[in-house]
Amino acid sequence: MKNRALGRGGPLVHPIGIGAMSFTDFYGPTTDANSHAILDAAVEAGINHIDTANVYGMGKSESAIGSYFKAHPGRRGKFSIATKASISRDADGARVFNNTAAHLEAELDGSLARMGIEAVDLFYVHRRDPEIPIEEVTESLAGLVRKGKAIGIGFSEIAPSSLRRAHAVHPVTAVQSEYSLQTRLPELGLVQTCAKLGVALVAFSPVGRSLLTDTPLSREAISEIGFLSSNPRFMEPNLSANIAATSGFRELAAEMGTSAAGLAIAWVLAQSENVIAIPGTRSVRHFAELLDAARLDLTSEDLAAIESVLPVGWCHGDRYSSGQWIGPERYC
């Protein structure tokens, strides 16, 4: 599978990257040793893009990456690194979004220190503060590029209209959005706008937070994960309905001689040359399943077969609860 540009004129990266939220305990306990083993496997497989954020484990994800580079000084150059900032807490502990130039630079400085690097290849605004015009935020990000602290800039979970406004101020390298067979909202404008502007669409949760794998998370595991235990798609009766709905997809993957996760990622990558997928895992064995996508070249018949078992709109439940929806921009 050919490498893809991380934005127009940007570095070439493998179409499959590493979603480093899994380098924290968000989806279950893990260790730096596990994370380092995945990075070792990535180097061996030619995977060269890591996506993290300052809030992943309150710095734990970035620190794991930093300790890996400290142990392997020559491997920094083998990876394109993206991180994000803007999610914060107010005096009462409530989650807030801070898009001010001072906050973004201070948080980026902290990220660089944790990872032990001089600059990131891509710096995202994790969530927009609607009180600050996106043009102003984009100019703040451009200032970080001029200072040499970031090479490219991006936004997470924004609307196509916001992307067009930002891109008019400074070239946007990438937009990050949830995109998978169970979350197809980006097809209503974001995929098309990214392609038109030459912006990479970085798809997180391409395997549907386990629903599009051979081993969906159990009810017991979900109950231990705060985010999923309150997510509509992982609450009953939706959970049972979704596991049943995806059974045909798992059977199709087996018939095609691949893992369900690999087939799910291959489907995402087949939607546009601008798409880069960033699945996450705490297991080297599961990481190998994700990489099945790299050897799949889906035909029109394959895509039709996938659509027949998982047609648009098959998933039960909204992708976020009302509280989880605070921050992402809705545009349809």
Image (cartoon, rainbow, N blue to C red):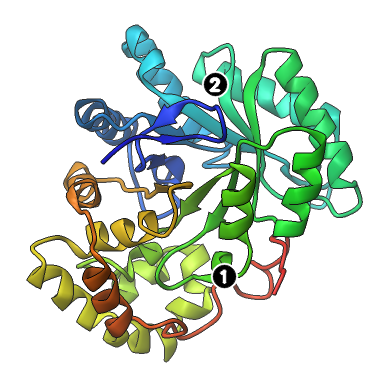
Q: Quadrant of the C terminus?
A: bottom right
Vertical comparison of 62 with 238: above or below:
above
What secondary structure is marked by label 2? helix
Q: Nearer the viewer, residue 313 or 171?
A: 171
Q: Quadrant of the N terminus?
A: top left
**Horizontal side of residue 138 vs 239, given as left or right:** right
In this orientation, does residue 93 appear?
A: no
Q: Nearer the viewer, residue 122 or 191?
A: 191
Circle 1: residue type: Leu
**Horizontal side of residue 286 vs 56, given as left or right:** left
Q: Nearer the viewer, residue 228 or 330?
A: 330
Vertical comparison of 60 with 148: above or below:
below
Q: Position of residue 172 (x, y in %)?
A: 67, 37
Q: Nearer the viewer, residue 263 or 57?
A: 263
The mark nearer the N terminus, 2 or 1, is: 2
Query: Which residue lies under the disc numbered 2?
Result: 114
Occupied quadrant, residue 40: top left
What secondary structure is marked by label 1? helix
Vertical comparison of 117 with 86: above or below:
above
Which mark is nearer the camera, 2 or 1?
1
Occupied quadrant, residue 44: top left
Circle 2: residue type: Arg
Vertical comparison of 50 with 131: above or below:
above
Quick one: label 2, few (<14), some, or many (20+) residues within 10 Å?
A: some
Quick one: label 1, few (<14), some, or many (20+) residues within 10 Å?
A: some
In this orientation, does residue 188 appear?
A: yes
Q: Position of residue 164 (x, y in %)?
A: 76, 50
Query: Which residue lies under the disc numbered 1?
Result: 185
Q: Position of residue 329 (x, y in %)?
A: 72, 62
Occupied quadrant, residue 39: top left
Instruction: Tell me what residue is drawn at x 89 percent, y 38 percent.
Output: 136
**Horizontal side of residue 135 vs 49, given as left or right:** right
